[in-house]
Image: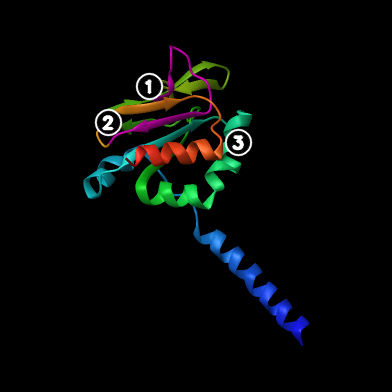
Amino acid sequence: MANKTMKKLALLIFIFSITSTGFCQLKSRTFEEIDSLQQIQKRKIIVFIHTDWCQFCQRMKATTFKNHEIIEKLNYDFYFIDFNAEEKRDVRFNNHTFKFQPSGNNIGVHELALELGTINNQIAYPILCVLNDKNEIIFQYNNYMALKDFKALLENLEK
């Protein structure tokens, strides 16, 4: 009898864990949405600039941005933008249209990635760029950021 109860309890825990992970999704905004969102509620903007080929970018996506605590903080206290630096579409942001700049055969970089991600005249991925509610850069970092360091950054930004 106790064995059956334990199985039911384990099954309930399993079902709850599956459904709770489904509800905790990171909301990624677009640059075009930011102006209207800021009119509703002023928040800092966290921009994660990455590429498909960057291993450290992919690792951050698989770890840092899958953490429930990080997801909750980003969803409720910030506007999060997940931006591919090789995005080919034009992006309208801060009263300016940014375009993809080809540099070879199907390669290049987006002007907006350069605008937000250039540090010391170079660009290296992944990039974290934080903007205030006036779209001004208040923080830039171009390297893999471990979970604990990212949590500390978010806590400092909330002050």
- Sooner in the amino-acid sequence: mark 3 or mark 2: 3
Residue under numbered circle 1: 115
Under mark 2, the amino acid is Asn
Range of magenta residues: 116-132
Residue 56: percent from left, percent from top: 60, 30
Q: Which mark is residue 94?
A: 2
Residue 54: percent from left, percent from top: 60, 28
Under mark 3, the amino acid is Gln
Residue under numbered circle 3: 58
| Residue visible at 50% across and 61% down in the picture | 23
Residue 64: percent from left, percent from top: 55, 42
Q: CA distance from mark 2 to mark 1?
A: 12 Å
Residue count near mark 3 (Cα–Cα under 10 Å), binned few <14, some 14–19, many ≥20: some
Q: Nearer the viewer, residue 149 or 47?
A: 149
Q: CA distance from mark 3 to mark 2?
A: 28 Å
Q: Nearer the viewer, mark 3 or mark 2?
A: 3
| Residue visible at 52% across and 20% down in the picture | 124
Under mark 1, the amino acid is Glu
Secondary element type, mark 3 = helix
For residue 129: magenta? yes
